[in-house]
Amino acid sequence: MTSTRHDGDTWDLASSVGSTATMAAAARAIATRTDPRLFDDPFAEPLVRAVGIELLTQLASGELPPGDLVEQVWIDVAKIRGKFYDEFFLDATDAGITQVVILASGLDSRAYRLPWPTGTVVFELDQPEVIEFKTRALAELGSAPTADRRVAAVDLRDDWPAVLRAAGFDPSQPTAWSAEGLLGYLPPEAQDNLLDTITELSAPGSRLATESKPNLRPGDEDRTKERLDRLSERWRAESFDSDMTRLRYFGERNEAAPYLVDRGWTLSGSTIRDLLAANDLASLSDDEMRMGDMRYVSGTLSAT
């Protein structure tokens, strides 16, 4: 059963917030199957299958059509989001950055599928159970990383910088960081702490990619909760218990992009609405959650 998020809660890839990583991988699998020219993750479907949630496996494999359960817009967003972060990392390493950190890596397979330049070290950080599962599942598929993959098996609520350093992370070297699909699952103050810590660990010239959601307007939170509740009802009708409202933290929070700019980052980005249009994908016809206004942002830390 899904329970409300709280301090110290735990999960695996089939429960609580961990199941959202599997849902995201299922969306990536559908996106790959329908439009591999735009985004291609050949590991998404087998990883979803390995988790063992029957409904998500059927969706990822194409045995069950997405239908009303996974709206086309979510599949299209998976395409542009995957493409955005792929291009971010490739641009960063092409520019000479050799140290990469993927925060809350979940079922992300970039350490196994991107053409990393020789000498690139990719650190994956997530809960120990999640890291262990993915490492084992990909090994059983006969897959090997395409970079020097190192794991930092730790909860972001613990002393993750110490675990990252113990894995070989060097804060004196420029780093390419990603915080993908993460910030909304953190309490507002934890989001600030995470962004502060990334900044503290970043040498000048480091790069960062994340999402920046606009500040709330009156009624935004209620509309988002209502929309998530309706989506959750669809999933429960298919015997998949995912209370999407309870998995997120609500309340006022700092908008990520201006918060980072105030700390020395120079950022640019595009809204989901603009990225859909730029990639000839359907526009948002129903946007109660203001998803189209969310920006994918990336940029560089200036020298101080």
Image (cartoon, helix red, strand yellow):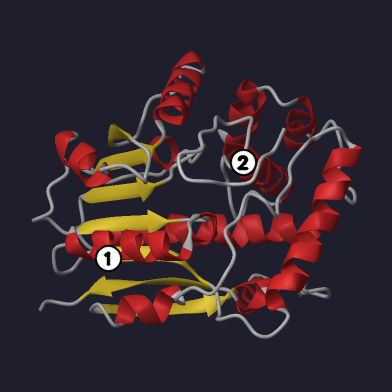
Residue 107: mark in rendering: none
Q: Is residue 144 above or below residue 20?
A: above
Q: 239 or 291: which is nearer to us? A: 239
What is the x, y in percent for residue 157? 36, 46
Q: Amino acid at mark 1?
A: Asp
- Report the number of discs: 2
Instruction: Check whether the beta carbons of the residues at disc 1 and disc 2 lie within 8 A of each other.
Output: no
SS of the residue at dot 2?
helix
Instruction: Tell me the amino acid under the disc marked 2.
Output: Ala
The residue at the point 62 percent across, 76 percent down is 278
**Nearest the eye: 47 or 189:** 189
From the top left corner, tell me how far across and down residue 15 is, in percent.
Answer: 63, 32
Q: Residues within 10 Å of mark 2 (few under 14, many from 20)?
A: many
Residue 125, above or below 193:
above
Indicate whether 55 appears above or below 293: above
Which residue corresponds to the image point at 73% horizontal and 29% vertical from the top-left? Answer: 57
Q: Which mark is residue 196?
A: 1
